[in-house]
Structures are given as structure tokens and as C-alpha cells.
Image (tube, grey):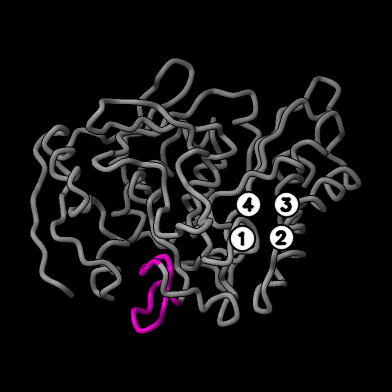
Amino acid sequence: MQPFGYTQATDLTAAIGLLQSGHAMPVAGATDVVQLLQEGVIAPVDLVDLNALPFTGVTEEGAGLRIGALTRLADIARDDRIRRAFPVLAQSLRETASPQVRNMATAGGNLLQRTRCLYFRDVATPCNKREPGSGCPAQHGQNRMNAILGGSEHCIAAYPGDMANALLVLDAELEVTGPQGARRMQLEQLHREPGDTPHLETNLRAGDIITAILLPATPRAARSHYVKLRDRASFEWALVSAAAAIELADDGTVRSARVAAGGVAARPWRLVEVERRLQGGRLDEATTRHAASAAALGADPRSGNAFKVPLLERAIERVLQLAGGAA
């Protein structure tokens, strides 16, 4: 581990100023950052501790909810309002890591966690995400956990998180504050596909800090569900995960839908064609199967992760049945 400085930010303006140079890194729960420091994957000049900032708790905002970015995952998962009105979010968080990690990890930090690609984590190997221009050995190497959607010849690392996929189907927004002031952005706009710049993972600017997650009260939110498929029952990353939020008309047909997948793409991945195929249909076996068959459209699997194509289709079919109350 390389030596680094440490500063506890006392207010938001000070924190932004410390981070604006690009040489410092924010830290709160530190469940991911400490591992990266220990493994030598990152070597920031300074760490800026955000824990003293007043961005914790779940509060009502209009008909929706506001989640402070420093709220611990465990606190979000057990909030009765989340469990009742946004079940997909509570379910995704209960499937995240372990109770110990959920007690420490924060909402904002979870959204910004780094990939679990073996080559990114191993500093003895090349990795375009860690060292731009060094290569991507995952293309023809060990790629079982890597992406089949949204990758490029420069990087096929998969985004590993659970919560972001749930937030995607809830049409969540982020409140971000930086040197130019506060702004809102759709959760869907946060993460970038790798293209030829895989080291640039988000659309945040230097000095930006996520301060809150905003959950609107959509007609789909209460009828939502999350499915996670993995090698073991706890403390494991998804091979494939699926999130869905469904609005049904009075006659039982689908009025609107949001569907997303995790563990298979370079960023949280919305399945627009699946949503289109659901529109106006009933959530019976034929409709869910037809819709789910579009989940892997455009996939570019490698030798080690081609199994994710049928697994993704089955996961989407299952989550649609659960969200629609047909299972």
C-alpha cells in the first residue's frame, strides 16, 4: 500500500475543494476502497473522509423518497417505506454482500464501486481500465464474470453492483453537487460504457459529490422485484441479476414496464426491447418468454461467459413473473 494523506471534510464546500484537483479520492464506508488500496490497484495522494457531512437518512420528498448518499445500505434495506413502496430496492440490498458490509457501505459509495474483473484487481497483469493502453487480457483469458453487453475491444469488465440495477427500474435521479453547484441527473446517465476510454467509468466531473438519491413515486414502483443468480447464497457477485417494475392496467395488461439486468454488462443495463415487447400484453407464460428472449439482443459473449445468454433470458422471465404476481 502506498502512503496517502487523510482529511476529514467538515462541510460540502471544503470537500469539493479537496477533490477538485483530481489527486484526492472520497471515502465513506470504505468497503471497496480499502481493498483497492491494499491490492495496490489505486494510489491516491489523499483520501477525503465524507462521513461528517449531513447526507444521511431516508426522508419523504413530495410523493417519493430522498435517500442521503451517506446512508448505510442496511438502513435503506430495513426502512418500512422502502420495503412497502419500492420493494425491488430493498430486495437488491438484502442480496448485496454480507450484513457486515451492508452495515458500513453507503448508498453513494455503492453506486461508484469498481469492477471485480480479475485483471483489474491484479496489478501484475495489463488492464486498460487501470492503465490505459496496456491491453485487455480478459478478451481471450479468464472472462467468466465479465460482460456480454456494452463492452468493447478495450474492456469487457462488468459493473458488479446490485442497487444500481434496482434504481434503474425505479427511474431514480441523483443529486450531485460540484464546483459549478448542484444539479440532478438520471441514474441511467451516471455510468459510461468503456468504448476506447474504459478508465473513465462515470459522467461525474472533478470535484463532484453525490449527495442524494431521489425516488419518484411512479405507478410501477410498488409492483417491482429483484432476482440474483450467483455461485453461492451470500457474499457473492451476480453472474446475472434482473430487476423489473411493472404497471398493470385495470384489465390486467401491461401499461408500462422497466426492466434491467446486472452482472452481464459494462454498466447497469436497461432492457428497452424487453419493455417494448411487454407493452399491452398480459404477464402470462407466452408473453414473459417472448419478452425475455430479447434480453440478450446485441450480446457479444466470450468463451468463458457464453452461458450468461440463456441464464439472462431465464432470469428476466422469472423476474417478470414475480413482479407481475404470476409466480
Of the residues tagged 3 and 4, which is closer to the observer? 4
For the record, the magenta segment spans 119-132
Label 3 and label 4: CA atoms lie apart by 8 Å
- Mark 2: give few (<14), some (14-19) or many (20+) Cα within 10 Å: some
Which secondary structure dominates the residues rendered in magenta? loop
Q: Which residue is mark 4?
A: 261
Label 4 with label 2: CB-CB less than 8 Å: no
Whether label 1 touches label 2, CB < 8 Å = yes
The reply, left or right, for residue 278 in relation to residue 185 is: right
Q: Nearer the viewer, residue 165 or 190?
A: 190
Mark 3, other Cα within 10 Å: few <14 / some 14–19 / many ≥20: many
Q: Earlier in the sequence, mark 1 or mark 3?
A: 1
Amino acid type at mark 3:
Ile
Please state, as top left, top right, bottom left or bottom right, where the N terminus lies in the image. Answer: bottom left
Q: Secondary structure at mark 1?
A: loop
105 or 43, nearer to the observer: 43
Q: Nearer the viewer, mark 4 or mark 2?
A: 2
> What residue is shown with label 1?
264
- Residue at 74% in and 64% down: 309
Question: Label 2: which residue?
Answer: 299
Gap in angstroms between the C-alphas marked 1 and 3: 12 Å
